[in-house]
Amino acid sequence: MNNVFKKLFNGIWTNNPVLVLLLGFCPTLAVSTTVNNAVGMAFAATFVLVSSNIVISSIRKFVPNKMRIPVFIIVIATFVTIVDLVLYGYLPKLHKSLGVFIPLIVVNCIVLGRAEAFASKNNVFDSFLDGLGMGLGFLLTIVVLATIREVIGNGTFFGKNLFGLSYSPAIVAILPPGAFLTIGLLLGGMNFINIKNKEREKMRKKLEKESLKTQKEVK
Amino acid sequence: MLKLLIIAIDSMLISNIVLMRFLGICPYIGVSKKQETAAGMGFAVIFVMVMATLISYLLQIYVLNPLKLEYLQTIVFIFVIAALVQIVEITMKKIAPTLFDALGIYLPLITTNCTILGVAILNIQKNYNLIETIVFSLSTGIGYFIAIYLFAGIREKLDWADVPEPFKGPAIGIITAGLMSLAFFGFTGLVKM
């Protein structure tokens, strides 16, 4: 059970696909104008990620090594087509606002990257967890980004007005430059936390050593 | 003629593929540490983009549409692009070795570059004819070149700047891209669509 959480946490924080591995920037930036779009995109990508990871890890023993990339791409493209048609049929509005970025899940480096780096080497259950963890990491990042952008740039959250009519939103946040600036600051913030954690760890070790020394001296 | 000019300016500057449409950001940040490599990547993108968009356009019009196989678009296009990059690589090695030396290492990277597939699909969605397709893909490629070359120039200078520790590396790069994108916003209104 511990292992399960570790795998999920790996995708969400330690190896967050967007903020740490720097993969899949294009959809993250493009679709995060509203939280609604962001959630739709993240679920579509997670579905593709999890199901292609499962299929790829279950066929990994039959696929010749040299043929693996084209095979992976077929598997991924199939699931992307399924998502595309399902969204078109049941959520046409979302399909329209995500636009070209649905077929582009095929070339989303997160999906192919995980297929190649993880699913082609591990068993089905672990690959499922890895896909889910990475998907959740993607979901979390894109939702945080979209929340910041929608609240600042439009004064709304999930389409609901937050600040009343007198608030005049800073439109730049929902325009393309705002996406770059916000994710740049998020990246810096994440680095800041990681650096602080490392320093704290160092300090703790140092203090432990010193206290051990004094204990010995006292003895 | 005027329409072609509008398409060219629009896809080069106003809706620049990287800074406004957010396609191809991974190589944009990955291969932009030096101006030389950025230029190489830019040329490779222009070259492959024109060919890939043209071939996928012809396939869509003459194969997928008559056979009513539009739902296979994604799979077919990604395969065409992957195969095309391989073919370009092999022929370039035989016919133009000097060009291959300059662009060779960037070609495999392009297969996973979402700009190529993105432009091929956008082109179909916009219902362009053959000439418009060529102009659209060429000027989009040039737009990519402009964006990545300028960005690499700024990043070379950034190496000497005193950047706060957490922002070193990609973080400051992305913020720079944001400022560039803001600057490119000045082109909006240059052409009325």
Image (spheres, coloured by chain):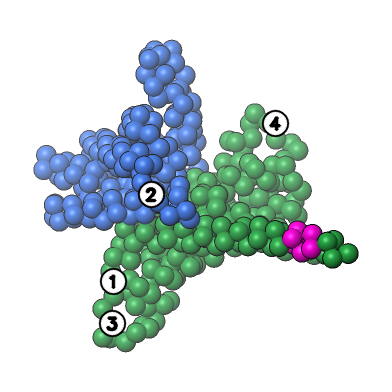
Chain colours: A green, B blue
Label 2 close to label 4 by CB (< 8 Å): no
**Residue A208 location (% of width, % of height):** 75, 62
- Secondary element under disc 1, as helix, strand or loop, is loop
The residue beneath circle 4 is A64
Verify whether residue A18 appears in magenta.
no
User: Residue drawn at (40%, 62%), measured in percent from left and top?
Assistant: A182
- What residue range appears in magenta? A208-214
Residue A170 disc label = 1
Q: Do marks 2 and 4 both belong to one polypeptide chain?
A: no
Q: Please, is residue A156 above or below residue B25 in the view?
A: below
Q: Nearer the viewer, mark 3 or mark 4?
A: 3
- For badge 3, the amino acid type reads Tyr
**Horizontal arrangement in the rendering, residue B39 relative to residue B27 (left or right):** left
| Label 2 to label 1: alpha-carbon separation | 29 Å
| Label 3 to label 1: alpha-carbon separation | 9 Å
**Residue A8 location (% of width, % of height):** 68, 61
| Label 3 to label 4: alpha-carbon separation | 60 Å
Q: Residue furthest front?
A: A218
Residue B141 disc label = none
Q: What chain is tagged by disc 1?
A: A
Q: What chain is tagged by disc 3?
A: A
